[in-house]
Amino acid sequence: QSWPIAVGHAPWVEEVWSNYISNAVKYGGEPPQITIGAEQEKNYVRFYVHDNGPGLDAQARSRLFAAGTRLAQHRALKGHGLGLSIVRRIVERLGGEVGVESEPGQGSTFYFTLPIAQN
């Protein structure tokens, strides 16, 4: 099955995927289970990475894409808390949006949108 085609700059989009997938492995369940996909909407494509991690509450979700954010339960892991803020800047520069859908105990779905390619 082929995915919808979106407009973007390949090295930047690769960086977004790399961040989302590495976070899903790092923060996912044991063993990590990851689903990736794409859905075509009206004028954009929504790409996503779903993991089986512990999930996030509303307060954590609201802070995730800010520079320097490290959630308390993950501070022992390596990193500076910049990855998702960089992802947000990249995607916004490409005309899209980022977000996360998550509830505690339900895993998380991180997504980004990009404008759909016109034929």
Image (tube, rainbow, N blue to C red):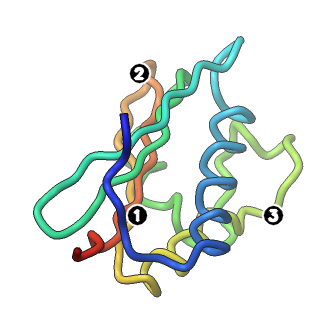
Front residue of 7/56: it is 7
Q: Quadrant of the C terminus?
A: bottom left
Q: Amino acid at mark 3?
A: His
Residue highlighted by disc 3: 80
- Judge left or right: residue 86 versus residue 89: right
Q: CA distance from mark 2 to mark 3?
A: 25 Å
Work out which residue is located at the far front of the displayed protein and give it: 119
Residue contact between numbered discs 2 and 3, judged by CB atoms under 8 Å: no
Secondary structure under badge 3?
Answer: loop
- Could you tell me which residue is drawn at 11 percent across and 63 percent down? 42
Give the class, few, some or many, for how many residues have Cα within 10 Å of label 3's Cα (few <14, many ≥20). few
Q: Would residue 56 be found to the left or right of residue 32 on screen?
A: left
Answer with mark 1 or mark 3, whichever residue precedes in sequence: 3
Q: Which mark is residue 98?
A: 1
Closer to viewer: mark 1 or mark 3: 1
Q: Nearer the viewer, mark 1 or mark 2?
A: 1
Provide the residue designation for mark 2. 106
Specify which label sits upstream in the sequence, 2 or 3.
Answer: 3
